Image: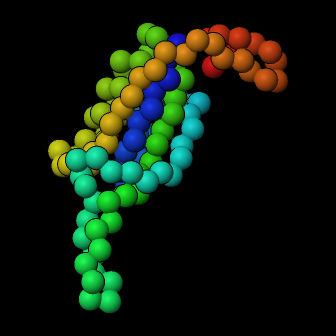
Amino acid sequence: MKKIEAVIRPGKLEEIKEALNKFNVHGLTISQVMGCGLQKGRKEYYRGTEITLNLLPKVKIEIIAKDDHVEEIIRLISQEAKTGEVGDGKIFIYNVEDAVRIRTGERGEAAI
């Protein structure tokens, strides 16, 4: 099993959710986060003073998937999130040792 974390532009969330739903990915966690990378934020003026806002609003999607579904999920997220501009986001993949469904006690892939 793998954990896929994608940090994306907020405006791309619905398109990504729709693509994942068509691939039968129904279990996911979505969080509103703040961050920066190469995008480096933006400059604004407040009462005549320039302020650099280097933390931008992003959305983090977390999915636990079977190993044989990971590449397709990455492809779907990348395809829907890509604008070609700095700030499109990142995808991280982690190994997951085990999972437990609290309600039934199922473990491993049966729990996801």
Location of residue 76 in the rendering, given as x and y in whole percent from the top left corner: 35, 30
* Rendering colour mode: rainbow
Q: Taking 56 as reference, is 37 left or right?
A: left
Q: In the rendered view, tell whether residue 45 sits above or below residue 57.
A: below
Q: Is residue 112 visible?
A: yes
Residue drawn at (53%, 47%) of the image = 31
Location of residue 6 in the rendering, given as x and y in whole percent from the top left corner: 41, 36
Q: Front-most of 109 and 93?
A: 93
Q: Taking 64 as reference, is 18 left or right?
A: left
Farthest residue toward the left? 84
Farthest residue toward the bottom? 47
Q: Taking 70 as reference, is 25 left or right?
A: right
Residue drawn at (41%, 57%) of the image = 57
Q: Taking 5 as reference, is 42 left or right?
A: left
Using the rendered view, name the quadrant where residue 99 is placed.
top right
Using the rendered view, name the quadrant where residue 82 is placed.
top left
Q: Front-most of 48 and 28?
A: 48
Residue drawn at (39%, 41%) of the image = 7
Q: In the rendered view, tell whether residue 1 sits above or below residue 55.
A: above
Location of residue 106 in the rendering, given as x and y in whole percent from the top left corner: 75, 12
Q: In the rendered view, tell whether residue 13 sits above or below residue 107.
A: below
Quadrant including the C terminus = top right
Q: Is residue 15 visible?
A: no
Q: Front-most of 52 and 34?
A: 52
Residue drawn at (49%, 15%) of the image = 95
